[in-house]
Amino acid sequence: MAIDGQQFVKNSMLTFFRQGINIVFGFVLLIVLARLLGPTGQGSYALITLLPTLLLTFLTLGMNTSSIYFISKGEVALQTVYINNLIIGLFLSLLSIGVGIFFVIFFSDLFFTATPHVLLFLCLGALPFLFLREFLQTIFQGLQDFKVFNTAIVLNQGATVIFCSVFLWMCHLGLLGAILAFMIGTILPVGYMLVLLNKKHHLRFSWRGFSKDYFRKAIAYGMKTHISNFASFLNYRLVLFLIGFFMFDAAVGIYVAAMNIGERLAIFASSVSNVLYPKIASIASEEERNRLTSLVSRTILAGTVLVACIGMLLANELIPALFGSRYEESATLLVLLFPGIALLSVEKILSNDLAGRGKPELNMYVSLWNVVFNLGLNTVLIPRFGLKGAALAATITYSFSFMVKVYVYRTVTREPFHRFLLLQKQDFKRYRTFIESRLKA
């Protein structure tokens, strides 16, 4: 299952290229939502779609990351993973719908005061497809078939943009149209991946193919990663609920505009991380693991810091030009978010390395502490400083988490700090050689 360094770079670049297409779709979607729904409508959209996304992240039980790990190591038959993922995904989606209905009925007045409840219930209907999309994508990630993996992501975002434009601009359906587009965007990639798994790998569904042994192994490994991933998700998204609680939906829309642009900074780090996790799991040599992650980590750090500095200089012109004058405050928020997001990009690389080594519990401990730390900061800073307080809390949390993860990685690998944080002289030769080979190709 191992692949050579050249294939790793190729997969990373393929992922980056298709993620780049995804960024374009993402920007178009942001612009459409911002201009046609306004800050209040965009804030309501963010909160409505956050509910099923939160339930998905909370209830996957780590089955998605277990799929990547065990497929990469070749320890479990692909057919077994496929059947288990389908059955467990459908069961968990039904459970999550029940939890979501309960939450809307009893807690919507706290977090969704200006949001139509019918749209909250409607959006819960996307959950079966969200679970299947997540569980099928990770099969392709474990196979290191990043062509299909990234095409599914682009199909998801592209379909959402197209249908959102049609429903909002041509049909004038408003917030309802945006929610329908979100749901269609989750359905199409599921069908695409099911067809390919059938054609390329001849996988067939059978209720009798469910493996209790694999389920137990997957839960034992995955729950450690799951808790870490869910805690990380709370760090990124809990702030939206808190802004909705302390402020109003329009404030959520203004913050979301800055947050979504800032997160695009991490696109290359995410692209490499998706490739790095199964790659590290498939490498037996500790020396080779350390060499690969150190090269990736220091390169990502240098690149994201450079892009963050450029973004901070352009923010005041970029935000109003894209979204309109109603989003001017988003520019200030973006400047505050950029430093933390740059460091977060590197932390993702180190986290995936640790998970690929079979030590996901280390990420879990750090993530759990970050949730408590971030929650405390937000409850203090949002009432006092508003949206600027939320952005500042995010950057402080990401920076603290980065420092802790750097120490943890250093402890596990014994790599000197400068090896995985600072560019080396030979790196520039590597970059030049790679660029020249690509140009010749």
Image: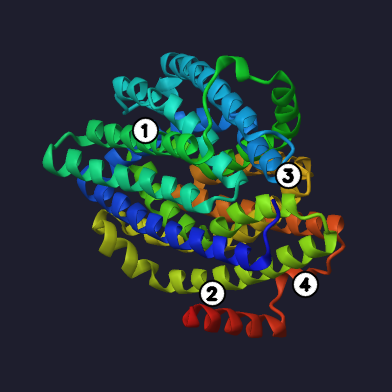
Foreground mark, 3 or 2, reads 3
Foreground mark, 4 or 2?
4
Above/below status of 384 relative to 428: above
Q: CA distance from mark 3 to mark 2?
A: 36 Å
Q: Secondary structure at mark 2?
A: helix
Badge 3: few (under 14), some or many (20 or more) residues near its Cα, within 10 Å?
some
Give the mark nearer the N terminus: 3 vs 4: 3
The residue shown at (71%, 84%) is 426
- N-term mark: 1 or 4: 1
Q: Amino acid at mark 4?
A: Arg
Marks 2 and 1 sit apart, C-alpha to C-alpha, by 37 Å
Q: Which residue: 12% across, 42% down?
A: 170
Which mark identifies residue 419?
Answer: 4
Q: Nearer the viewer, mark 1 or mark 4?
A: 1
Question: Who comes first in sequence, dot 3 or dot 1?
Answer: 3
Quick one: SS at disc 1? Answer: helix
Q: Quadrant of residue 12?
A: bottom right
Above or below 257: residue 130:
above
Q: Residue at x 49, y 47 (%)?
A: 149
Q: The residue tagged with tag 4: helix, strand or loop?
A: helix
x and y percentages locating residue 80 in the rendered image: 64, 28
Q: Count residues near mark 1 (Cα–Cα under 10 Å), then give few for <14, some for 14-19, many for 20+.
A: many
Check disc 3 and give the amino acid type.
Lys
According to the image, label 1 marks what residue? 187
- Residue that numbered label 3 is attached to: 73
User: On the image, numbered disc 2 is attached to which residue?
Assistant: 306
Q: Residues within 10 Å of mark 2 (few under 14, many from 20)?
A: few
